């Protein structure tokens, strides 16, 4: 028998009641629908497909130096509290005959960020997906993020940042490659106005 999926907006209304609120007062009347719409947007990554995203944007080139996209904005929801965590992702890879369109990397980050996540898994998913579809010599992903579930509840001091990383291939085996990546992401945008 198929399990019926409860409506999100109906569940939000129940939640408001459970919190002792009056879901029929003016400010809350359309809140269940608004929350559902927001949550559907913030979890739209479930419906996206990495293969489709990356395979159409692979190009054959002889470039074999490190490609880095840094300071990619990340907004995600922690799966433990359904509260946002947000920050920056830095993604690098060393091509092995193929490069991926630069704009696809932030879109790949969004695809995995727009799901219920933990920062560690988000980091690994980005790295492993690039490894799988682009087949580079190596991939490095670093995410620096602040978690509202920690900050707002006073679990952590304001401004504390969680840093996660996932290194594959040359980024794992070659100290020099990893160091180059880590020092490049620390640099500010010198000379870029
Ligand atoms: Zn949390």
Image (cartoon, rainbow, N blue to C red):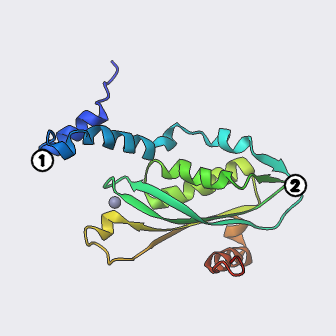
Spot occupied by residue 92 in the image (x, y as percentages of width and height): 68, 64
Q: Quadrant of the N terminus?
A: top left
Quadrant of ligand 1 in image: bottom left
Disc number at residue 61? 2
The quadrant in which residue 148 appears is bottom left
Left or right position of 43 against 33: right
Q: Residues within 10 Å of mark 2 (few under 14, many from 20)?
A: few
**Front position in the image: 92 or 13:** 13
Residue at 32% in and 41% down:
34
Local SS, label 1: loop
Left or right position of 23 against 83: left
Spot occupied by residue 124 in the image (x, y as percentages of width and height): 56, 57
Residue at 57% in and 54% down:
109
Q: Quadrant of the C terminus?
A: bottom right
Which-is-in-front pick, marks 2 and 1? 1
**Front position in the image: 35 or 97:** 35
- Residue 67, compared with residue 59, is above or below; it is below
Spot occupied by residue 19 in the image (x, y as percentages of width and height): 14, 49
- Residue 16, compared with residue 91, is above or below; it is above
- Residue 127, compared with residue 65, is above or below; it is above
**Front position in the image: 27 or 109:** 27
CB at mark 1 closer than 8 A to ligand 1?
no
Q: Which residue is mark 1?
A: 21
CB at mark 2 closer than 8 A to ligand 1?
no
| Residue furthest front as drawn | 26
């Amino acid at each position: 028998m198929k399990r019926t999926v409860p409506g999100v907006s109906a569940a939000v209304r129940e939640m408001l009641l459970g919190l002792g609120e009056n879901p029929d007062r003016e400010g809350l009347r359309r809140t269940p629908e608004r929350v559902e719409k927001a949550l559907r947007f913030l979890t739209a990554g479930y419906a996206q497909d990495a293969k489709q995203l990356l395979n159409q944007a692979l190009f054959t080139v002889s470039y074999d130096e490190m490609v880095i996209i840094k300071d990619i904005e990340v907004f995600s929801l922690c799966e433990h509290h359904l509260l946002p965590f947000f920050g920056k992702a830095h993604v690098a890879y060393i091509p092995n005959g193929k490069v991926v369109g630069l704009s696809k990397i932030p879109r790949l980050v969004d695809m995995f960020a727009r799901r219920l996540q933990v920062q560690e898994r988000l980091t690994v998913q980005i790295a492993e997906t690039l490894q799988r579809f682009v087949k580079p010599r190596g991939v490095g992903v670093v995410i620096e993020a602040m978690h509202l579930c920690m900050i707002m509840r006073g679990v952590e001091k304001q401004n504390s940042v969680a840093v996660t990383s996932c290194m594959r291939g040359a980024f794992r085996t070659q100290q020099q490659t990893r160091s180059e990546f880590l020092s490049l992401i620390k640099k500010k945008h010198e000379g870029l106005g």
